[in-house]
Amino acid sequence: MQRRFQACDATRNLLLCALPPAERERLFPHLQAVTFSLGQSVCEPGEQINYCYFPTSSVISLLYTMQDGSTAEMGLVGNEGVLGIVVFLGGESTCSRALVAVAGDALMLPGKLLQEEFARPGPLQQLLLRYTQAFITQISQTAVCNRLHSVEQRLCRWLLLCQDRKNCLDLPMTQELIANMLGGRRESVTVAAGHLQDAGLIHYWRGHINILDREGLESNVCECYRVVEDEFDRLLGRERQPEFSRPRPSRTVGSFPRALQTGELHLLQVLKEF
């Protein structure tokens, strides 16, 4: 869904905010506001990319799909960046699929225009290059994380990354979608989410996950989360958002047995809800 662009929309994207006023205002006449729904496909593998997107409240996942249909996430793009770096780097398409992980808004810009602006030496070119370096770090660290860390740690990382880019405690999403992102089975994500909920870190119901204790998630997440976010902060000068947290419960995720403490009936109930 498209709507009329307003200048205040640009203040909700880090890259656009970081540009000098003259550079930013040169883009304004060509920006158009769009709204993405959960699970919407923004771009398919091999498809020519005609537009770049600067998310303001949406979060978009880059997924790779294997021949057997299994999927895994390569990276996330939210209000810290732009979807479509292949355009200004000289490519016309990508092997990944761009899927909306968290519904929300974005600003759409013709890819050819961004390519022309990037070719002009100046603040925009430098900023996009630094963002690309940070995004490469995220892709690399995601590969490491998927190989070495547990589903619970990866789920904590994914939720924190989404929350940083959405800046909202309530994340509309389903566990089936998360499983596709993490490259795991839905049942494994259900068990992991159950552990986090029993520990008081999140609350989930049909189509929504609410972060109750951000500090608790950070205590249980793997090192990959901080590596990625520190690199974005360093390269883009990003200021951290205020923490959304409550006092951490005395129990930790690690203290829970593999099966949910509330038993198999609780697991079956969760499966029905998702």
Image: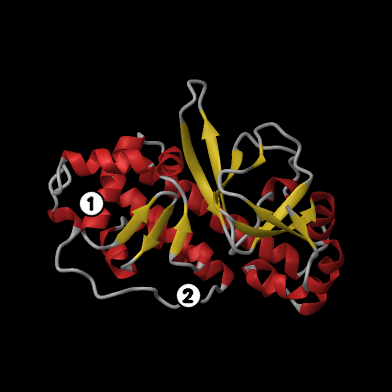
Amino acid at the residue labelled 2: Arg
Q: Nearer the viewer, mark 2 or mark 1?
A: 1
Secondary structure category for the residue under label 2: loop
Secondary structure category for the residue under label 1: helix
Q: Does label 2 or label 1 sit earlier along the sequence?
A: 1
Name the residue nearer the viewer: 114 or 57. 57
Q: Where residue 195 is drawn, which disc sits there? A: 1
Q: What residue appears at the point 26 percent right and 55 percent down from the top-left corner?
A: 196
Q: What is the spatial separation of the Cα atoms under label 2 and label 1, in whole angstroms?
A: 27 Å
Where residue 272 appears, x then y in whole percent? 33, 39
Name the residue nearer the viewer: 167 or 119. 167
Q: Can you say whether 139 is above or below 17 in the image?
A: above
Where residue 138 appears, x then y in whole percent? 49, 53
- 10 Å crowding of disc 1: few (<14), some (14-19), many (20+): many
Q: Can you say whether 43 is above or below 89 in the image?
A: above
Amino acid at the residue labelled 1: His
Number of numbered discs = 2
- Residue at label 2? 240
- 10 Å crowding of disc 2: few (<14), some (14-19), many (20+): few
Where residue 248 appears, x then y in whole percent? 23, 71
Give the quadrant of residue 187. top left
Residue found farthest to the top: 68
